[in-house]
Image (cartoon, rainbow, N blue to C red):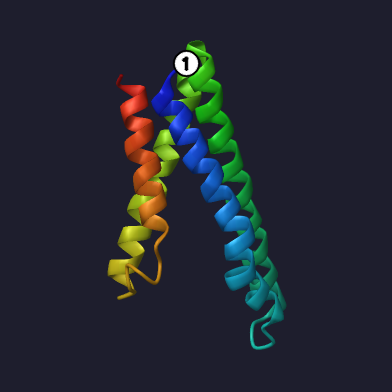
């Protein structure tokens, strides 16, 4: 078993729960209550919210599968690439839109997933 890929799976699973439960209360729920957003835009954003939920869950599964089954190495590569893309996009968006790194802390979780998954892939 690859302990680093297992760790990436665990961190990604925790990220999934943070996204779904804490983020659901602070981001998705207020979005759905908003009356000043066009319904198509509102529900498209909500749909995308759930696409992220599914993607995070599948990333967790991919890291876990590769951790226990070395022949599933490619699954971890895909999850790692997604983690890096999410990390880079989050940092880029913060800088581009002048947001706060503490106000949009997702980069921390994706950074840890990327580092842990990367070590697992190259160990």
Q: Position of residue 23 (x, y in %)?
A: 57, 64
Give percent across and percent down for residue 1.
47, 15
Q: Nearer the viewer, residue 36 or 111?
A: 111
How far across and down, in percent of the image, does residue 28 sit? 63, 69
| Residue at 39%, 72% in the rendered image | 103
Assign the C terminus to one quadrant of the image.
top left
Question: Does residue 104 appear in the picture of this structure?
Answer: yes
Q: Does residue 37 appear to the left or right of 118 in the view shown?
A: right
**x and y, in percent, of residue 53 in the image:** 61, 50
Give the vertical position of 64 relative to 87 (above or below).
above
Of 44 and 57, the residue lying toward us: 57
In the current view of this chain or complex, which residue is farthest to the top?
Answer: 71
Q: Is residue 69 above or below residue 7?
A: above
Q: Is residue 105 above or below residue 80?
A: below
Note whether 33 is above or below 1 in the view shown.
Answer: below
Q: State left or right for residue 75 relative to residue 36.
A: left
Q: Residues within 10 Å of mark 1 (few under 14, many from 20)?
A: few
Q: As drawn, is 83 to the left or to the right of 41? A: left
For the point 44% across and 27% down, the residue is 5
Q: Residue at label 1?
A: 1
Q: Tell me if I can see residue 48 in this picture.
A: no
Name the residue at 50% across, 29% down: 63
Foreground residue among 67 and 94: 67
Q: Secondary structure at mark 1?
A: loop
**Residue at 59% over, 63% down:** 22
């Amino acid at each position: 078993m690859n302990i680093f890929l297992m760790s990436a799976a665990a961190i990604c699973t925790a990220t999934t729960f943070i996204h779904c439960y804490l983020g659901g209360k602070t981001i998705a729920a207020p979005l759905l209550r908003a009356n000043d957003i066009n319904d198509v835009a509102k529900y498209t954003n909500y749909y995308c919210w759930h696409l992220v939920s599914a993607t995070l869950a599948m990333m967790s599964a991919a890291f876990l599968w590769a951790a226990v089954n070395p022949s599933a190495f490619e699954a971890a590569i895909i999850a790692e690439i997604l983690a890096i893309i999410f990390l880079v996009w989050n940092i880029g968006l913060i800088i581009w839109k002048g947001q706060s790194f503490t106000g949009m802390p997702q980069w921390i979780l994706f950074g840890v997933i990327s580092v842990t998954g990367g070590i697992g892939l190259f160990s």
